[in-house]
Image (cartoon, grey):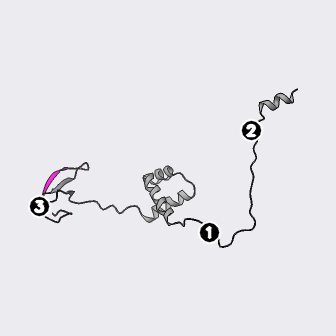
Amino acid sequence: MQCPECKLDHIRKNGINRQGKQNYICVNCQRQFINDYQSFKGYSDEMRNECLTMYVNGMGLRAYARVKKIHHSTVINWVKQVAQLLPNSYSPEVNPEVGELDELETFVSKKKENLDMDSC
């Protein structure tokens, strides 16, 4: 076994980690390591696309994290990565001549002062 840092063979055992694997330490460079690291390749492109589709369709971050059994911060990071690929601003080639605006009018209540004057 070799140290992954300095590639020398002079190593010693150095306790057991939380997962129950043997820790080793290099005598030369003091780097601590384990013999075999699991190589987690990450989530599949299909999983990533499904989560981003759910995000675009309005599902909450924590909701699809629960459905897909992944951490919500992972999905937030995916959204941030996709957002960086988008252009900074939209600049249309032709400016529109006519625009449309909808109004919303609501009535809350009359003021108390107006009610007193109306009764006189």
Residue at (76%, 41%) from the top-left corner? 107
Per the model, the C-alpha gap separating discs 2 and 3 is 80 Å
Q: Residue at x 57, y 55 (%)?
A: 58
Cβ atoms at labels 1 and 2 below 8 Å apart: no
- For the magenta stretch, what is the residue range? 1-19
Most foreground residue, 7 or 97: 97
Which residue corresponds to the image point at 74% horizontal and 63% vertical from the top-left? Answer: 99
Q: Secondary structure at mark 3?
A: loop
Within 10 Å of the Cα at label 2, are there few (<14), some (14-19), or many (20+) other Cα atoms? few
Q: Classify mark 3: residues with Cα within 10 Å, few (<14), some (14-19) or many (20+).
A: few
Q: How many marks?
A: 3
Q: To which residue does mark 1 refer?
A: 91
Residue drawn at the location 35% of the way across and 63% of the way down? 41
What amino acid type should be assigned to the residue bearing mark 1?
Ser
Which residue lies under the disc numbered 2? 108
The quadrant in which the C terminus is found is top right
Upstream in sequence: badge 1 or badge 2: 1
Q: Indicate whether 6 appears above or below 12.
A: below
Rate crowding at label 1 as few (under 14), some (14 to 19) or many (20 or more) other CA atoms within 10 Å.
Answer: few
Nearer the viewer's eye, disc 1 or disc 3? 1
Marks 1 and 3 close (CB-CB < 8 Å) = no
Q: CA distance from mark 1 to mark 3?
A: 62 Å
Q: Residue 10 — which label?
A: 3
Q: Are marks 2 and 3 in contact (CB under 8 Å)?
A: no
x and y percentages locating residue 45 in the rendered image: 44, 65
Say if 98 sits above or below 15 in the image.
below
Assign a secondary structure to mark 2.
loop
x, y percentage for residue 119?
87, 27
Kind of residue sitting beneath label 3: His
Does the magenta-highlighted stretch encompass residue 12?
yes
Q: Main secondary structure of the magenta part?
A: loop
Looking at the image, residue 4 sits to the left or right of residue 98; the answer is left
